[in-house]
Image: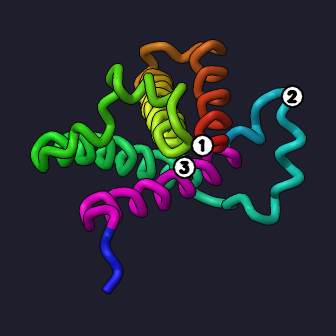
Amino acid sequence: MRLRKTDYGTIILHWVLVAAIGVALFSGLRIATEMPNQGWLNLFDAVLPDSSVWVSHMQAAIVLVSVSLAYTVYLIRSGLTRRVALDKSRLRGLLGRRQARLGAISLILTWGFFAAMLVLIGSGGALYFGIWAGHTAVMMHWYATWLLLAF
């Protein structure tokens, strides 16, 4: 019998997150085709959705916020916060053996992902509610999208 390396809660939240990011990405890219200097996105017309992109983008945003909150609560309630703790011993792992170094790099990338998600949720919410609906917010949302894709 194979030993599990993770728990079912993490697996379920992970795949719901992946699906929501996929919907948000494709609907967001369709929305971005209307931006100046983004005409190159029209090359992807065949795979980008045609209708109700705003609705699906907002629904994906709600799922992303929900999963982010659910994962935070799940980590705290299940006692798994150590999994994402960025402490001195983990950072020292950057200079250690290969396994410790890979674990530290993975954790730093995880926190980079969390930061990109916060920027996306924050800038998206600010744009939607008109709190900060300027070029800077749009560009933050744009760059955070590509950073998220890099992860």
In which quadrant of the rendered image does the C terminus lie?
top right
Q: Under tag 2, what secondary structure?
A: loop
Per the image, is 11 magenta? yes
| Residue under the point 35% across and 80% down | 2
What's the coloring here?
Answer: rainbow
> Mark 1 or mark 3: which is in front?
1
Asked if residue 126 is among those painted magenta in the image, a careful observer would answer no
Residue drawn at point x = 61 percent, y = 49 percent: 25
Residue 93 placement, left or right of 67: right
Q: Amino acid at mark 1?
A: Phe
Asked if one can make out residue 124 in the rendered structure from this viewpoint, the answer is: no
Task: Kindly identify which numbered label has been placed on residue 24.
Answer: 3
Q: Earlier in the sequence, mark 1 or mark 2?
A: 2
Question: Given the current orientation, which residue lies at the most extreme bottom position?
Answer: 1
For marks 1 and 2, give the CA distance: 25 Å
Q: Earlier in the sequence, mark 2 or mark 3?
A: 3
Q: Amino acid at mark 3?
A: Ala
Q: Which percent across, then down, holds residue 98?
A: 56, 42
Residue 150: x %, y % from top left: 66, 41
Give the CA distance from mark 1 to mark 3: 15 Å
Label 2 to label 3: alpha-carbon separation: 21 Å
In this view, the residue in front, 1 or 147, is 1
- Label 2 crowding class (10 Å Cα cut-off): few <14, some 14-19, many 20+? few
Residue occupied by mark 1: 151
User: Which is nearer the eye, 136 or 109?
Assistant: 109
> Which span is picked out in magenta?
5-30
**Residue 37: numbered disc:** 2
